Amino acid sequence: MKLSRLVQPRNPLFWLMVVLNLLSMVLAWVTHTQSPVAFVSSVIVLFTIGNAVLGAYLMWRLVNS
């Protein structure tokens, strides 16, 4: 399995993976820098985890395609 197969700029899955990983980083940054209410913080954390899992799945599909 080659990691160079991960970078496929012509594949829309690659760009979706990049956007989801960037969104996860932004959501994690917001959670750490702001002090939202516990419920809002929990929702942001759930979105962050969901984005990270979906990004990892897309990465796995790109490497194995």
Image: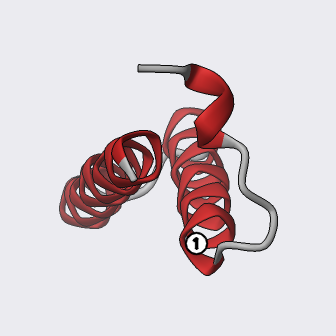
The image's colouring method is: secondary structure
Residue farthest right in this picture: 9
> Looking at the picture, does residue 11 appear above or below residue 65?
below
**Rendered location of residue 62, percent (x, y):** 46, 51
Residue in the image at 69% along x and 68% along y: 15
**Rendered location of residue 4, percent (x, y):** 68, 28
The residue closer to the viewer here, 64 or 43, is 64
- Answer with the quarter of the image where residue 27 lies: bottom right
How many circles with numbers are drawn on the protein?
Answer: 1
Type of the residue with mark 1: Leu
Horizontal side of 48 relative to 35 (left or right) equals: left
- Answer with the quarter of the image where residue 58 lies: bottom left
The residue closer to the viewer here, 39 or 64, is 64
**Rendered location of residue 26, percent (x, y):** 65, 52
Q: Quadrant of the N terminus?
A: top left
Residue in the image at 28% along x and 51% along y: 57
How busy is the neighbourhood of tag 1: few (under 14 within 10 Å), some, or many (20 plus)?
some
Residue farthest bottom in this picture: 12
Q: Secondary structure at mark 1?
A: helix
> Looking at the picture, does residue 28 appear above or below residue 45?
above
